[in-house]
Image (cartoon, rainbow, N blue to C red):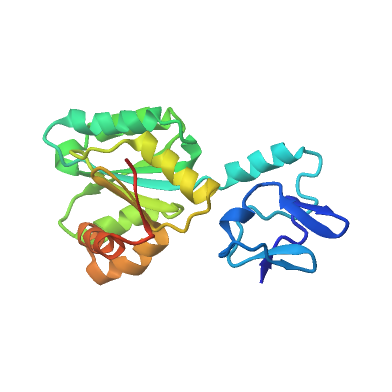
């Protein structure tokens, strides 16, 4: 049984919990009645905000909450396909990522490109991205081996919570997408697997790991996952 016992955000009075100082309990109960055990709130799934009672004890409740929230920003892994005939398309997406309000240390970026096409151009782009403290690298297509090439991308984005693969020709609002993912997954603790914004899908990496070997092709896997979650509570459309 999950509960708020010994959590620094549990406000206890006379041996009974009065409220959750992080205001997260309301997202974790499956019914409208407050459930308690020995005077402590209980819930049906893991609370990511639970911290020991003496955690950061020298800080105020508000400071501890902001610290916990900052620790829970989802890691976003972005693969940019350099597949447009116009190099400016890739540059425009890179500019969106560089200028996003999202914490830069929570973004991992891989540029996926043909070596013969962009071997000299991509390093300059990576250098510009790194100057903004965004972790980035490139995977160059040398041989036409989809599984091996895509596996190289996954390894570089191993720490991601959500993965997206975006064509240079795609329409997507990066800042709105990342802000919404954080709001729903972090602030509201929603159990969502897929976020869609225009042409881009942001997919829970655990879901990708479970599904990819069935297809050995990210685009085919992406299409299949979207068909599974459409019209379900596991998909959120970002508008």
Q: Nearer the viewer, residue 171 or 16?
A: 16
Q: Nearer the viewer, residue 81 or 35?
A: 35
Q: On the picture, is 72 further left or further right than 62?
A: left
Residue at left offset 36%, top offset 33%: 97
Is 170 above or below relative to 236? above
Q: Residue lying farthest front?
A: 32
Q: Is residue 9 left or right of residue 91?
A: right
Q: Quadrant of the N terminus?
A: bottom right
Residue 116 sits above or below residue 151 on the image: above
Query: Residue 103 vs residue 115: left or right?
Result: right
Q: Position of residue 236 (x, y in %)?
A: 36, 51
Give me the residue at 41% from left, 31% from top: 100
Is residue 197 found left or right of 35 in the rendered image?
Answer: left
The total of numbered circles placed on residues is 0
- Report x, y in % for residue 166: 26, 44
Residue at position x 59%, y 45% from top?
A: 71
Residue extending furthest left? Answer: 85
- Outermost residue on the right side: it is 14
- Say which quadrant the C terminus sits in: top left
Task: Depth check: give the residue in front, 97 or 182.
Answer: 182
Q: In front here: 90 or 119?
A: 90
Q: Position of residue 145 (x, y in %)?
A: 18, 60
Residue at image point 86% right, 60% down: 15
The location of residue 198, given as percent across then percent down, is 25, 42
């Amino acid at each position: 049984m999950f509960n708020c016992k010994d959590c620094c955000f549990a406000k206890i009075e006379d041996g009974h919990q009065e409220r959750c100082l992080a205001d997260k309990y309301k997202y974790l109960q499956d019914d409208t009645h407050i459930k308690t055990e020995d005077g402590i709130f209980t819930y049906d799934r893991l609370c990511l905000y639970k911290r020991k009672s003496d955690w950061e004890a020298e800080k105020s409740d508000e400071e501890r909450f902001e610290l916990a929230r900052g620790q829970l920003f989802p890691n976003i892994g972005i693969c940019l396909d350099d597949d447009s005939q116009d190099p400016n398309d890739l540059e425009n997406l890179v500019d969106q990522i560089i200028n996003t309000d999202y914490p830069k240390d929570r973004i991992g970026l891989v540029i996926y490109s043909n070596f013969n096409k962009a071997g000299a151009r991509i390093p300059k782009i990576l250098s510009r991205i790194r100057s903004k403290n965004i972790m980035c690298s490139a995977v160059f297509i040398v041989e036409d081996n989809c599984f091996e090439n895509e596996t190289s991308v996954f390894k570089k984005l191993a720490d991601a919570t959500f993965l997206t693969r975006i064509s240079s020709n795609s329409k997507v609002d990066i800042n709105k997408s990342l802000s919404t993912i954080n709001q729903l997954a972090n602030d509201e603790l929603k159990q969502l697997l897929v976020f869609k914004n225009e042409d881009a899908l942001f997919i829970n990496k655990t879901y990708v790991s479970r599904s990819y070997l069935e297809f050995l092709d990210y685009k085919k896997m992406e299409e299949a996952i979207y068909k599974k979650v459409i019209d379900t509570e596991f998909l959120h459309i970002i508008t």
